[in-house]
Image (cartoon, rainbow, N blue to C red):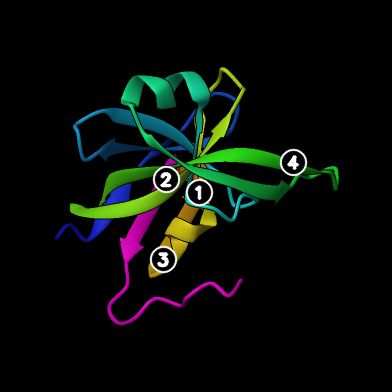
């Protein structure tokens, strides 16, 4: 098992992390501490990846509005291990998001001055999110 995942900062000061799906597709995701799910992807990419639909989830956006988003079953490689995640679909055509659900069990270092986006695996048990 890998001990860390390393990303980068883009020119707009957005932190990125590249992860792979279990089928080998590579995803460039923006690390978003305001999104408490696991992964959000554009619906066109979800269709291309042939993910199976699970239903819908409700999210509260930054402006306070609540939206329903389709959800899909996905599997990613996280620290070199297969991990089943709920992927939320969006109509947006831009990049996907990596949310705080994947921060659990990690030390996350976001340092734009050092161009560092680093997820280090902690030893021990991860805190479980309460719903």
Q: Nearer the viewer, residue 119 or 59?
A: 59
Q: Position of residue 64 (x, y in %)?
A: 85, 48
Query: Mark 1 touching mark 2, by CB under 8 A?
Result: yes
Pick the residue in front: 108 or 69: 69
Q: From which residue to which does the magenta span run?
A: 115-131
Label 1 sits on residue: 111
Q: Work out whether mark 4 precedes mark 2 in sequence or the reverse, and give the earlier one.
A: 4
Residue 128 appears at what percent x and percent y?
Answer: 47, 75
- What residue does disc 2 label? 116
Query: Comparing marks 3 and 2, which lies closer to the viewer?
Result: 3
Q: Which mark is drawn over residue 20?
A: none
- Location of residue 39 with respect to 1 vertically, above or below: above
Residue 61, horizontal then vertical, whole percent: 76, 44
Taking 104 as reference, is 6 above or below it?
A: above
Q: Are marks 4 and 2 in contact (CB under 8 Å)?
A: no
Q: Residue furthest right?
A: 64
Q: Secondary structure at mark 4?
A: strand
Q: Are marks 3 and 1 in contact (CB under 8 Å)?
A: no
Task: Please give the residue where the numbered disc 4 appears in the rendered image.
Answer: 67
Name the residue located 47 percent from the left edge and 51 percent from the top edge: 38
């Amino acid at each position: 098992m890998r001990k860390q995942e390393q990303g980068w900062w883009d020119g707009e000061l957005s932190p990125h992390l590249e992860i792979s799906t279990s089928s080998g597709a590579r995803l460039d995701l923006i690390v978003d501490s305001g999104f408490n799910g696991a992964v959000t992807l554009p619906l066109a990419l979800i269709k291309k990846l042939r993910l199976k639909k699970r239903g819908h989830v409700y999210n509260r956006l930054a402006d306070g509005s609540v939206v329903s988003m389709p959800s899909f079953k996905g599997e990613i490689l996280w620290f070199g291990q297969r991990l089943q995640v709920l992927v939320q679909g969006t109509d947006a055509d831009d990049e996907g998001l990596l949310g705080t659900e994947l921060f659990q069990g990690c030390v996350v270092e976001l340092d734009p001055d050092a161009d560092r986006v680093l997820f280090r695996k902690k030893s021990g048990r991860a805190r479980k999110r309460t719903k």
